[in-house]
Amino acid sequence: MKPSSIIFITITAIIVLCCAGCTTVEEPPSTEITGDQLEEYMHNAAVYARSVDKDEALAAFSDPNGPYVKDNLYIYAYDFNGTLIAHPYQPEKVGTDRTNWTTANGLHFVKAASDAARNKSGYIVYMYPTPGEEQKIDEEMHNLYEVKLGYVEQVDDTWWIGSGIYLSDYIDAATGEMPAEIAKMTALTESAVAYAHENGTPAALAEIDNQDGLFTEGNLYIYAYDYNGTLVAHPYLAPGMKGTDLSGYEGPYGVPVINVCAQTAKNGGGFVVFGWENPEKGGATELKLGYVLPVDDEWWVGSGLYLSDIFGEEETATASKGRTVADVVDFVTKACDHADSVGKEQALQDFGDRDGEFVDGNLYLYVEDFNGTTLAHPIHPQKVGVSRLNATDPNGLLLVKGLCETAAEGDGFFMFMYQDPADNFTLTPKLGYVKKAGDDWWIGSGVYLANLVDPKTGKPLPVISDLTGFVKEAQAYAQSMAKDVALSDFRDPASEFADTTHPIYAFSQDGVLLADTTHPDAEGTDLSDSVGDYGVSYVTEGAKMAGNGGGFLISTPQGEGQRLDYVLPVDDEWWIGAGVPVSVIVDESYPVSV
């Protein structure tokens, strides 16, 4: 644990906050244990379990008067099939399959803890009720749930053990106080509420959006939502995400994260626990402890810590790998072969299993019929049964329609904008591959542009770095020259900016084409109303993107095929961009006919 001069709130306050809106309960006896002591306790228990017969160990762990029970500290045991096999305070649950049991806020605890145990050992965080009379635990008493910081260790490849400390009992070995990182999180969240009350909502939201502002400290930052689940401020999400309804997002291990946070804030605030993708681990799933507070009756703020932030763990989860287009094609082809083998009904169940073989880090399947109805989706199961034919990405691209029409041809590629969980859910291009699985349905998957690598070198695709580098050079040139001079060069088909792969074009901020060697007759024309195939107003969206600092845009000029564009502002009056056909990206990264 890191030392800290921050004085944490009292234990009594923590108990109240963990159960915001709940009945106050008598404080349990304090065990005041550090993380190192918890690890030692667990390791000793695992050594014991390996040294004796399994039944003897399970009997010892299940004995409420045995040597491994001390106040709120005890050992529980599970096999890797999710069956509880030892528990001193819940003997009636021993022998039952707890795979799908959830805590008060919906966390699939057994799945999360089992994943940590499969990595030999590791920390977990969860909500769990405190023991009541005669040290009995009633999981239906949601008012007794508190945050527990736990540790699990694998005994052998068939079973594992765990234990945990209530947050109110946990101390930092260096300071004798509560963990400094958690104190910092709660203090930052409280300061954001105070700032909003003192300076008003617009000023507070602007400050939360500022990556260099008061509410961003390294990995710790404040985000803000309204009570309907709409994002209203975030320092790292792309500007286009603001105003997006994220109430339907279900995080890893089953928690409807934004809804749970909103409800907790509405009830006065407190701690929440959920799974989230950690950008510093390539988007790998990690448990996260969050803290939320209401600002007023319209919006709330929150912050969060990954377990690795609290405990300073070495990375144990496997980071998302770089992907080639061949990886995606093979993944979808394997799924189609599986469907042929086991039948559609069983295949759809398998494809929708978040913990199944058809989820590989940031690679997963989405399955739809040709009417756009989702048949299986492991990340967003709430979409199953919903017709999404008219669904668009945030730039207005009819992505489901495009995917359906591509699949109808047999197979193929289609690019769209999507939130990347490995990059704070920033909107980023995603290259989808779809394949017809039957007369009335298809299977697809995709790779984010940031993860797409050259199959020969394992490095990012040169065509992408060439595109972005070319536009940045043109931006620097335009900003260093008079506007007329720069535009004259951008119009010149013999200039360096008329590259045959991705020539530079220029628009005014209100949509008038200023320069384009591929469409010289259209120069001076207001193209702000231009709508491409699949519905994107690409000139208007390009102006918005440039106005927000620039970035990638998928343009679909009528009849010209999909194109990935990169745009940057020159100044407040005009912007530039260039694009490369999606087919060129596919050919460079997957030079095989599919």
Image: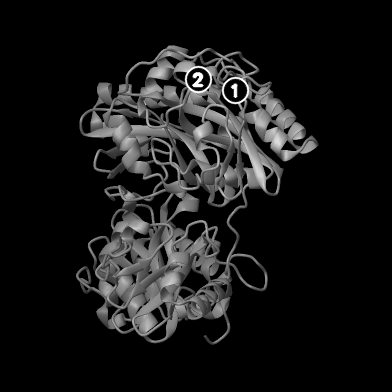
Q: Is residue 170 left or right of residue 373?
A: right
Find the residue positioned furthest to the right. Answer: 51
Residue 197 is drawn in which quadrant? top left
Disc number placed over residue 328 in the picture, else none:
none
Amino acid residing under circle 1: Pro
Residue 375 is drawn in which quadrant? bottom left
Label 2: which secondary element = helix
Amino acid residing under circle 2: Gln
Q: Is residue 324 left or right of residue 507?
A: right
> For the residues marked 2 and 1, what is the alpha-carbon distance in whole angstroms?
9 Å
* Closer to the camera in the image, 243 or 525: 243
Percent x, y of residue 584:
49, 79
* Closer to the camera in the image, 308 or 425: 308
Mark 2 surroundings: few (<14), some (14-19) or many (≥20) residues within 10 A: some
Percent x, y of residue 364:
49, 64
Taking the image as drawn, is residue 233 in sight? no
Please determine whether, in this image, residue 372 is positioned above or below residue 129.
below
Taking the image as drawn, is residue 16 in sight? yes
Point 76% across, 32% down: residue? 48
Q: Are marks 2 and 1 in contact (CB under 8 Å)?
A: yes
The residue carrying mark 2 is 135
Q: Mark 2 or mark 1: which comes first in sequence?
A: 1
Percent x, y of residue 122:
64, 38
Point 43% across, 65% down: residue? 349
The residue carrying mark 1 is 64
Percent x, y of residue 149:
55, 29
- Colour approach in the figure: one colour
**Is the N terminus in the top left, top right, bottom left or bottom right quadrant?**
top right
Please determine whether, in this image, residue 406 is positioned above or below residue 186.
below
